[in-house]
Image (spheres, rainbow, N blue to C red):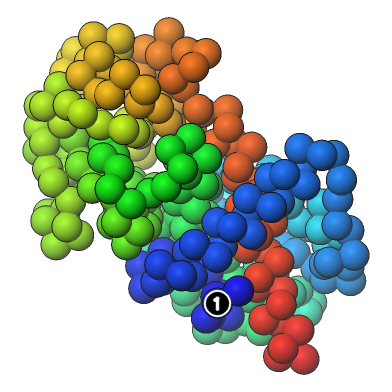
């Protein structure tokens, strides 16, 4: 295992062998999970704190399950920041957690860079579970694992990431991971929702959805992140669905064996038609959730090995 860092704050900066090793380890945890076995000795005596300043269903639960399946003591903290100075709260919280000697700290925060700041203030290994519009590294890992299980590889695949790219940390982490692993990444959406940095990241930009989906192996849909938009960036949900919602007609432009992904939470009828989201063969949305637990077990395992070295 070649993972080089104490923390997992971003996909940007990781190299192909680091990603491939994490995915291989996650694959072995996926098999373990399916067999119903656990490895509760691996993180025995370790404390994992889930520190979530933003809402979450899948991510928080799967980190909790991942920690428990490896034997860690898991504590969930949900913090509302609505009425407090965020910077101060974050650093106060950091020193409190540090005094409790937690080993692994999973952080979700509305501000980009918050987990990185925390990582400089605590002794624990920090895992970014989504920071503002910046990155969501474990989501990109679970997406990559799901793709690899279906397509056998990442290299050379055409992956179309569609919808609200600008506000999506999922899209950003996926762009970094997939381009690093040799996929051909396209981003598809209205000009208001495509970030200026897309060109720098080496992805192709499409404003016409059918053109963007043509020949794609993977179609990844994203939620309209209205909570991060400063103004009306799309006319209406109905209008958005007409141009950028995934339905059978648009999906027919992708390869006949293409898979459909969504990180959740889904807005049915806005970015994706229910019939596609629930499609028995094309949709792999349920498997993404399953791979989420496996990938988080792999990340906790690898970071805990680093902690042991530091003792
Ligand atoms: C995403 C997130 O929080 O960034 N959800 C997730 O972790 N699966 C995507 C979203 O909120 O739309």
Q: Nearer the viewer, residue 52 or 304?
A: 304
Which residue is denoted by mark 1 in the rendering?
Answer: 2
Where does the image place residue 115, in percent across and percent down from the top left?
A: 50, 68
How many discs appear? Answer: 1
Where does the image place residue 14, in percent across and percent down from the top left?
A: 41, 71
Q: Is residue 156 above or below residue 241?
A: below
Tell me if 195 is positioned left or right of 117 in this view: left
Q: Is residue 86 above or below residue 78?
A: below
User: Can you say which quadrant of the picture contains the N terminus?
Assistant: bottom right
Q: Is residue 283 above or below residue 182?
A: above
Q: Quadrant of residue 74?
A: bottom right
| Residue at the image point whose x is 42% and y is 31% from the top | 261
Q: Nearer the viewer, residue 63 or 185?
A: 185
User: Can you say which quadrant of the picture contains the C terminus?
Assistant: bottom right
Residue 152 appears in the figure? yes
Which element is circle 1 on? loop
| Residue at the image point whose x is 13% and y is 46% from the top | 204
Kindly give the residue lying farthest to the bottom in the view shown.
311
């Amino acid at each position: 295992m070649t993972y080089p860092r104490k923390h997992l704050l971003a996909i940007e900066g990781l190299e192909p062998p680091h990603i491939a090793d994490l995915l291989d380890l996650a694959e072995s945890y996926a098999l373990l999970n399916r067999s119903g076995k656990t490895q509760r000795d691996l993180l025995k005596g370790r404390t994992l704190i889930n520190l979530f300043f933003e809402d979450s269903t899948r991510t928080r639960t799967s980190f909790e399950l991942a920690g428990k399946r490896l034997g860690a003591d898991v504590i969930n903290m949900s913090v509302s920041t609505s009425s407090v100075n965020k910077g101060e709260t974050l650093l106060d919280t950091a020193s409190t957690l540090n005094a409790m000697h937690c080993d692994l700290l999973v952080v979700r925060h509305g501000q980009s860079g918050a987990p990185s700041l925390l990582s400089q203030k605590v002794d624990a290994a920090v895992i970014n579970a989504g920071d503002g519009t910046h990155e969501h590294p474990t989501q990109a890992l679970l997406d990559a694992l799901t793709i690899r299980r279906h397509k056998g590889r990442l290299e050379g695949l055409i992956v179309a990431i569609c919808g609200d790219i600008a506000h999506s940390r999922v899209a950003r982490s996926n762009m970094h991971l997939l381009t690093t692993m040799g996929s051909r990444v396209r981003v598809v959406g209205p000009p208001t929702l495509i970030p200026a940095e897309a060109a720098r990241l080496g992805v192709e930009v499409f404003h016409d959805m059918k053109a963007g989906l043509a020949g794609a192996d993977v179609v990844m849909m994203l939620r309209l992140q209205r909570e991060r938009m400063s103004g009306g960036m799309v006319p209406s949900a109905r209008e958005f669905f007409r141009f950028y919602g995934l339905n059978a007609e648009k999906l027919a432009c992708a390869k006949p064996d293409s898979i459909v992904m969504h990180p959740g939470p889904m807005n049915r009828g806005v970015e994706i038609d229910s019939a596609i989201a629930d499609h028995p063969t094309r949709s792999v949305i349920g498997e993404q959730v399953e791979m989420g637990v496996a990938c988080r077990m792999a990340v906790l395992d690898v970071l805990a090995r680093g902690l042991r070295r530091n003792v």
